[in-house]
Image (cartoon, helix red, strand yellow):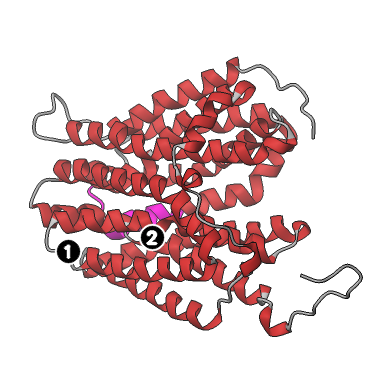
């Protein structure tokens, strides 16, 4: 502190974090996290079947439980990891998460039993909750005028990583279902070493705060839903939309094997194509569609397209048609940004942060509930006791959720102007 009238104390240049180096590391972290997330999807069915010595139906059921464990730990640990970043700084939290992910992927790769696989997903949910501190590090080093651009780079890094990850996972799957996990462990370890050498602490000691148990409660944002007011119908629509969209990450690998007999390589290629479609939609279509239709009709357009895709995958049995439909996922990329914009117009400027907390809570609830509603029907209708073989069962459930989303949006009145 300086006395009134005294010039401010100069901080040595070496004490200031290098924004470019920090931003590159955070982008690399998000990119590698996305690769690690996607790289294991194509081989998860084969690994579960190998460890469980069961059928694809059994693996689908177990895969749903694995997803629920992962999502639950993300939900529970998100506030804790964020609080630790505010208390001890971003650097130790992010580096600890990267080191933990490297260990986690190695544990899964060497798993001798299903129990170890559950332990791996448990740890992945904890260490994967570092996205919040990563974004906070960017906020520390970027000005308000540059923040949207920097966050856009991070979104691009995640999108590219999710395209690259499944493709690599599918190719490595030819070497066995454990190979992609070894690769993911190596990537996380390399990024950990990279961070040790280049990532500076972005949160100065005077900006840190003590741990507040109240802030660490993951149910806090859920309680805020009771104060949602005019935005509540859109939050409900967002919940059903998130539930419907979970069908791809939760069940696609199992669905593709059950419907078309695809190898892990083809599953990886198909997921990469879907990622390309979504990326191209975000890049080329969202702005044009919203400008032409407006936000409400853009949401209806995107949800309608997605619902038709869900219905198509519920009934098709031709793998070439399946590949072609994957590119159409670009049309549904307009839903998320348009729905977020609709919600933001229904709350005042000083409530935008609380709204984002509500959105995160709704998405977390969908991620926990979605695997049960989607994976278990697929497991039942591809199992030995099913009255008829129906590998499109999960997509049929998503079709219903898509129609519910459309109905809620259609019945929601237009927003009243809110104070800035």
Say if 69 sits above or below 398 in the image.
below
Tell me where the magenta segment starts and ends, as one range: 261-273
Residue located beneath label 2 in the image = 127
Is residue 161 left or right of 259 when viewed as pictured?
right
Q: Nearer the viewer, mark 1 or mark 2?
A: 2
Residue bearing the label numbered 1: 111
Q: Is residue 179 left or right of residue 73?
A: left
Residue depicted at x 69% and y 77%: 16
Expressed as whole percent of the image width and height from the top left, the position of residue 11 reads 75, 79
Q: CA distance from mark 1 to mark 2?
A: 18 Å
Q: Residues within 10 Å of mark 2 (few under 14, many from 20)?
A: many
Residue 81 vs residue 110, the one in the foreground: 81
| Image-based side of 8 in relation to 102, left or right | right
- In the image, residue 179 lies in the stretch drawn in magenta: no
Furthest toward the right, the residue is 5
Q: Is residue 264 visible?
A: yes
Q: Residue at x 58, y 25 (%)?
A: 227
Residue 302 at x, y = what percent?
56, 33
């Amino acid at each position: 502190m300086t006395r009134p009238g005294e010039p401010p104390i100069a901080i040595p240049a070496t004490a200031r974090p290098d924004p470019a180096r920090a931003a590159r590391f955070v982008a690399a972290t998000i990119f590698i996290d996305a690769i690690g997330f996607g790289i294991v999807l194509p081989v998860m069915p084969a690994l579960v079947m190998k460890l469980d010595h069961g059928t694809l139906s059994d693996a689908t059921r177990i895969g749903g439980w694995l997803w629920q464990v992962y999502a639950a730990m993300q939900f529970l640990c998100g506030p804790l990891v964020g609080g630790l970043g505010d208390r001890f700084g971003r650097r130790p939290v992010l580096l600890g998460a990267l080191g933990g992910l490297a260990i986690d992927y190695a544990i899964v790769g060497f798993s001798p039993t299903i129990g170890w696989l559950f332990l791996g997903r448990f740890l992945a949910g904890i260490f994967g909750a570092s996205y919040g501190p990563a974004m906070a590090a960017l906020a520390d080093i970027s000005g308000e005028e540059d923040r949207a651009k920097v966050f856009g780079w991070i979104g691009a890094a995640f999108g590219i990583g999710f395209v690259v990850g499944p493709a690599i996972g599918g190719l490595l799957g030819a070497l066995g279902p454990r190979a992609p996990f070894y690769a993911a462990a190596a990537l996380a370890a390399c990024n950990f070493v990279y961070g040790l050498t280049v990532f500076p602490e972005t949160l100065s000691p005077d900006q840190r705060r003590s741990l507040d148990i109240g802030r660490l409660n993951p149910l806090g944002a859920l309680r805020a839903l009771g104060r949602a007011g005019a935005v509540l119908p859109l939050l409900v629509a967002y919940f059903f939309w998130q539930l419907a969209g979970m069908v791809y990450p939760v069940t696609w690998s199992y669905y593709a094997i059950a419907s078309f007999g695809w190898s892990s390589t083809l599953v990886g290629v198909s997921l990469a194509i879907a990622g390309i479609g979504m990326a191209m939609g975000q890049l080329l279509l969202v702005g044009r569609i919203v400008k032409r239709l407006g936000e409400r009709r853009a949401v209806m357009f995107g949800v309608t397209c997605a619902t038709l895709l869900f219905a198509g995958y519920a009934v098709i049995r031709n793998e070439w048609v399946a590949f072609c439909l994957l590119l159409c996922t670009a049309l549904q990329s307009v839903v998320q940004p348009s729905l977020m914009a609709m919600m933001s117009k229904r709350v005042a400027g000083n409530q935008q942060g609380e709204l984002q907390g509500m959105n995160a809570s709704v998405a977390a609830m969908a991620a926990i509930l979605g695997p049960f509603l989607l994976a278990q029907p697929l497991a039942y209708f591809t199992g030995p006791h099913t009255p008829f073989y129906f590998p499109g069962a999960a997509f049929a459930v998503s079709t219903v959720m898509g129609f519910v989303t459309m109905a809620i949006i259609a019945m929601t009145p237009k927003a009243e102007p809110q104070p800035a």
